[in-house]
Amino acid sequence: MLALLEMSLSKLPAMHNCPVKLLLLLSLIVPGMAYAERVKLPNGDVYEGDFVDGMREGRGVYLWADGNQYEGEFANDRLHGSGVYTWTDGRVYTGQFVRGRREGEGAMSWSNGDRYNGTFRNNQIHGQGEFVWANGDTYNGNFVDGQRTGRGTFTWHTGAQYSGDFVGGVLQGQGTYRWADGRQYVGYFVDGQKSGQGVFLWLNGNRYVGTFEGDQRSGDGVFFWRDGTVYRGQFANNKMHGWGIKRQPDGVQEIQHWQAGDLDKSQPVVAEPRCRLEHMGRSWMFVSDTCINGLAHGSGVAASLDGSLIIADGRFVLGQLVAGDLLTLPRDEPLFPEARIDGS
């Protein structure tokens, strides 16, 4: 029996320490026997720590030939449990390992000053955690395979902050972006830009509710001034562009047409007795010198007296619409009611 064990030991990598062979021999004779020893492997790696049945088990220090080092717990010859892994480039991981991989709760730091504290899976940042960059930027939220994905909050060292959805490290989905100067956007993002429905608020009380595209107010929207004036209509590139209706605080309404932020047409929304128009169960404003018998007749623009609809480039015959583009203006109803400037 002893001769067979010695023959088995002779097949192990050469070890320059006879007591090690003896301890290994004893471990084979007495299963479960624990011992500590320093072992240098043929590839230049060095392990110093606990063995059980000839395998690394318990606490120890493993130094790779390239200079990387691990100090902590082992099980079944693998990094398993809690420990500290140090790379030669200055990275340091302190936390849990499972079968040789960073898994569970841990903290990691980089030589440039970046640091992360949270959960890991399969050697990657994964799950809930906080990443702090050396420049002062911080992210607190969910990670998937090393990237910001899911819900989280990113705070820039400049004072700006975003709370909401991320995909692959990019603002994607619904969220709230706050600028350092107090401006705020609540709505949807696509590829890091404001896109879709949203609310933009200014510190002076003005706000825009409507559609965004390419990070700008574009499409149908409603602009509220702090004095109570409301404009409902079309926007492009952060400016009023196209048709809309403006309502003054006293209730007076005007149909307006804008060209890249410049007003080029304006007409009060008031019924014209010479050009009566009833359409879709509503009374309309239509003004033309060609009206006949008190009925809308000819070409032009019409607006419902309730300020909700516009017929652009309309053509009317004796009070009947025969052609034209019907525009339904957005309602001035709350969108994202949680959108408000802090303190308001």
Image: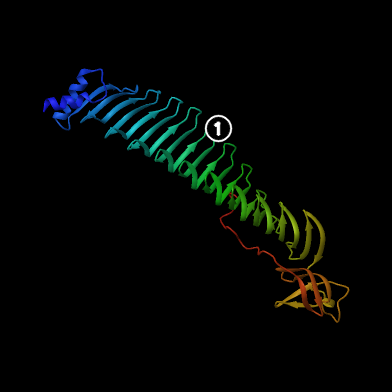
Q: Quadrant of the N terminus?
A: top left
Provide residue 29's location: percent of width, then percent of height.
Answer: 13, 29
Front residue of this view, candidates 44 and 34: 44
Residue 344 appears in the figure: no
Query: Relative to residue 335, is residue 25 depicted above or below?
Result: above
Q: Quadrant of residue 249?
A: bottom right
Residue at 54%, 37% in the rendered image: 137
- What amino acid is found at the position of numbered circle 1 in the picture? Asn
| Residue extending farthest bottom | 293
Front residue of this view, candidates 155 and 211: 211
Query: Relative to residue 342, is residue 33 depicted above or below?
Result: above
Provide residue 205's location: percent of width, then percent of height.
Answer: 66, 52
Provide the secondary structure element on which disc 1 rests: loop
Q: Quadrant of residue 282?
A: bottom right
- The residue singled out by tag 1 in the image is 135
Horizontal side of 279 relative to 293 (left or right) equals left
Provide residue 244's location: percent of width, then percent of height.
Answer: 74, 62
